[in-house]
Image: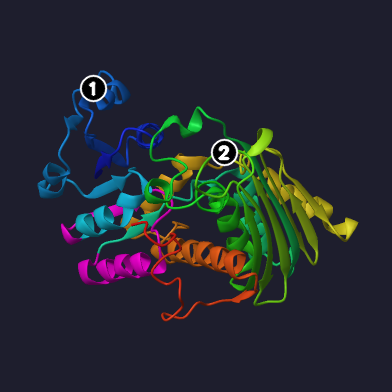
Amino acid sequence: MIRVAILGAGIGAEHLAGYRALPDRFRVAAFCDLDTTRASAVVGKDDTVRILSDMAEVLADNQIDLVDVCLPPHLHAQVAIAAMDAGKHVICEKPLARSLGEASAIGDAVTRSGRSLFPVFQYRYGPALAALDELVGSGLCGPPVMASLETHWNRAADYYAVPWRGTWAGEAGGAILGHAIHAHDLLCRYFGPISKVQAHLATRVNPIETDDCAAIALAFRNGALATSSVTLGAARDETRLRLVFRDLTATSGTEPYSPARGPWRFEARDPAMQDRIDGIVAAHVAAPTGFAGYLAAIADHLDGEGSNAVLFADGQTSIELVTAIYAAARSGQAVTLPLPADHPMWRGWLPEGVS
């Protein structure tokens, strides 16, 4: 049984529901938030969960195996590092860090502590992507060719009523960091490492400091290409992915927060292969979705079993891409990856004077 402490009662409420869906694998022992009334409301009538307001109590508790960081982005790196140095495994909400420098410091903590760090990319889990994993693994897809992504969501004044949102100091970035990061993670998962990025960013929807629109072009080391369209000014929240491989095209529905649960189309280029593909897709209809799938993979990993858990390197890749997008947009030039340690934005993309 993995004993968990959740830090933060915002998105932490969704994490709690995920743990409660896996009672044989996790026990949430503590829930920590500066506002204990808010934390108590999230936990409900469950006296097995300690409500705390001081993170130091969590880190000092030898009974806690895993600390789940659900705090504002500017706290992620320092809290994750402190938790690992206290001997805890860590789950960290996105974004993992505010710079490649911070991500590197987290990686150093992983190495010296011997603990595991799991970035939160729960969109990877669900029936459609479990099927796609098998289709790719079986060779039925062939190499990736072209992809298009749409992260078209609606964010208005009520969303930005939380004081730290929409600010560089609090949120550390805009739509490419807080919204499209999941679609970009899925793209990299199936298309591999990116070699070149070109980008245009704009703030056109809300009176905020950070970006809320983006048009991005990506080239991959294997020769594949992709485009990503991002806006927070759509009429409703929709995410759409179209992944074209040599032998198969995978097209998502428009489910924004759990794309792997929605209806996908898997179409063989050779019609003679369609029945085989349909059989694989049908075999995964019961795959766990979202946090339940994400947490089950973590439990398998910590138990020493084979798993498809999201690991530190996946979070580091996401931060490198965000860095490259900001660098490309501000310079007006294509940016080549991987980024070296002496890159001007290695220590962050925040505007001068923001910390």
Q: Is residue 138 magenta?
A: no
Q: Within 10 angstroms of label 2, few (less than 14), some, or many (20 or more) residues?
A: some
- Which residue position is annotated with label 1? 37
- Left or right: residue 45 versus residue 289 is left
Name the residue at 55% across, 63% down.
326
Mark 1 lies on a secondary structure that is helix
Q: Is residue 98 magenta?
A: yes
Where on the picture, by quarter, is residue 135? Answer: bottom right
Where on the picture, by quarter, is residue 89? Answer: bottom left
Name the residue at 51% across, 53% down.
177
Residue 299, compared with residue 140, is above or below; it is above
The residues colored magenta run 85-114
Q: Within 10 angstroms of label 1, few (less than 14), some, or many (20 or more) residues?
A: few
- Labels 2 and 1 touching (C-beta < 8 A): no
Please tell me which residue lies in front, 13 or 283.
Answer: 13
Q: Where residue 38 sits: x, y (%)?
A: 28, 24
- Which residue position is annotated with label 2? 257
Q: Which kind of residue does numbered mark 2 sit on? A: Tyr
Residue 297, compared with residue 155, is above or below; it is below
**Residue at the front extreme?**
353
Q: What quarter of the picture does the C terminus occupy?
A: bottom left
Name the residue at 30% across, 68% down.
105
Please tell me which residue lies in front, 199 or 61.
Answer: 199
